[in-house]
Amino acid sequence: MDCPKCNAHMNEIKVEVLQGAIVIDQCSSCKGLWFDNGEAEQLKKSWMSDFLDSGDPSIGKTYNRVRDISCPRCGKLMNKLTDKRQPHLEYEACEEHGMFMDAGEFTDFKHETLMDLFKGLVASLKRR
């Protein structure tokens, strides 16, 4: 599979959790992460996933500007979504197959803080 943002090769990463193994894909270049449906939510709860998002968040922010990306599984255009609990966090999702998070976004998604409330307010003001 190739990265939907920079077209580099995606490497599989296996994570052992209580329910078994989860395999996600990480871009070899931009370090973005592909999660099949439900995997990000499942990994959010696992301490074993703390090491997954090894990319540079500042590089991830530059790739966050890339629009009109296609699902690496089916080729359909993915939707740009915001996390309901953290509205400053934007990611791309294919309804049928999964979601793509740029470098740094999964760490932000995983660790909700009081600062996320402030970031969400700022993000909503910028979108106006």
Image: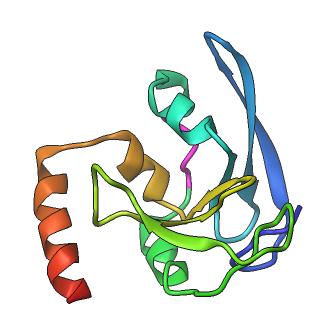
Residue sitting nearer the eye, 97 or 104: 97
Percent across and percent down for residue 124 are 19, 76
**Does the magenta portion include 113?**
no
Asked where in the image residue 119 lies, by quadrant, the reply is bottom left
Percent across and percent down for residue 24 are 73, 43
Q: Is residue 10 left or right of residue 95?
A: right
Residue sitting nearer the eye, 65 or 80: 80
Q: Is residue 7 left or right of residue 117?
A: right
Total residue callouts: 0
Residue at 49% over, 65% down: 56
Position of the C terminus by quadrant: bottom left
Q: Is the magenta stretch mostly helix, strand or loop?
A: loop
Q: Which residue lies furthest to the front in this view?
A: 95
Residue sitting nearer the eye, 108 or 83: 83
Colour scheme in use:
rainbow
Question: Magenta segment range?
Answer: 50-54
Q: Is residue 103 left or right of residue 125?
A: right
Percent across and percent down for residue 41 are 51, 36
Position of the N terminus by quadrant: bottom right
Residue at 37% over, 56% down: 83
Q: Please tell me whether residue 10 is drawn above or below residue 3 in the rendered image.
A: above
Residue at 45% over, 58% down: 105
Residue at 73% over, 80% down: 6
Percent across and percent down for residue 16 are 68, 19
Q: Please tell me whether residue 113 is drawn above or below residue 68 in the rendered image.
A: above
